[in-house]
Amino acid sequence: MENNELTKQEIMAHVDHTLLKADADWLSIRKLCEEAVRYGAASVCIPPAYVAAVKEAFGDKPVICTVVGFPLGYSATGAKLEEARQALVEGATEIDMVVNLTHVKNKNYSAVTGEIRKMKELCGSHILKVIVETCYLTEEEKISLCGCVTEGGADYIKTSTGFGSAGATLEDVALFRKHIGPAVKIKAAGGIRTKEDLVAFILAGCDRVGASAAVTALYGNAG
């Protein structure tokens, strides 16, 4: 597919329209949701504290995605599960969970897989994306985490939180494609700010792209 074959609408259909700043206020969250509905984003990715309010204000559109164990990932598994449980009750239908990097660095991959599996059991038919935070990983660790995400039954492997020392790269997406199972999709996030970035990651095989600047990149200040 050539770049010019991707319309703005097709690009936005892959975008998790994101606002995860610590000081995000309700007016900003509401604007994010209005833009997501207007331009056909795949979802809004918002702080857990806003899930119930967005559900009440907007109903089933936009799709609500929220984060768990964010942004560092080293919360206890039980705490992550409770976070996810409450988010699902309040109206989220997609969960982006940060992997426990302390387990990764200790090569305790069975613990990583076990946590992902428990989270997916809780999520059931709802989408689970596992954030592996590639900027802190060796290539060996990235490959091992592809196995953990696949064996744990998650729906997506996600590159980054956007809060680490670096974000998504096309090289990491290519590596994931080689090592994830056929049922696992890829979400790129972190530092994706231009139309060219969005197109490049979608054409590289990302089913989702997490971005806060997609509407501005595609439509200017019309949002």
Image: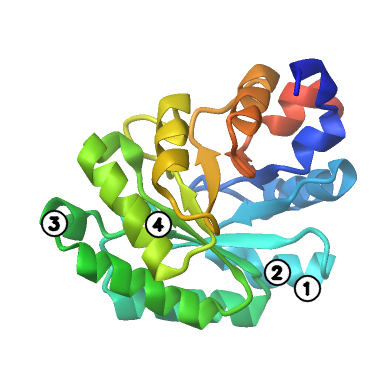
Mark 1, residue position? 56
Residue identifier under label 3: 107
Query: Could you give the CA–CA distance between mark 3 and mark 2, rounded to whole angstroms?
Result: 39 Å
Spatial CA distance of label 2 from label 4 is 20 Å
Amino acid tagged 4? Phe
Residue where numbered disc 4 is placed: 70
Task: Give the label, 1 or 4, closer to the camera.
Answer: 4
Observer-nearest residue: 29 or 141?
141
Q: Residues within 10 Å of mark 3 (few under 14, many from 20)?
A: few
Residue type marked 2: Ala
Q: Position of residue 162 (x, y in %)?
A: 45, 39
Name the element at disc 4: loop
User: Is the C-beta separation of discs 2 and 1 under 8 Å?
Assistant: yes
Choose top left, top right, bottom left or bottom right for residue 195: top right
In this figure, which residue is indicated by the disc labeled 2?
53
Q: Amino acid at mark 3?
A: Lys
Q: Quadrant of the N terminus?
A: top right
First of labels 3, 4 by sequence position: 4
Q: Does residue 162 appear anywhere in the picture? A: no
Q: Nearer the viewer, mark 3 or mark 2?
A: 3
Quadrant where the image shows the C terminus: top right
Asked if residue 218 can be seen in this view, the reply is: yes
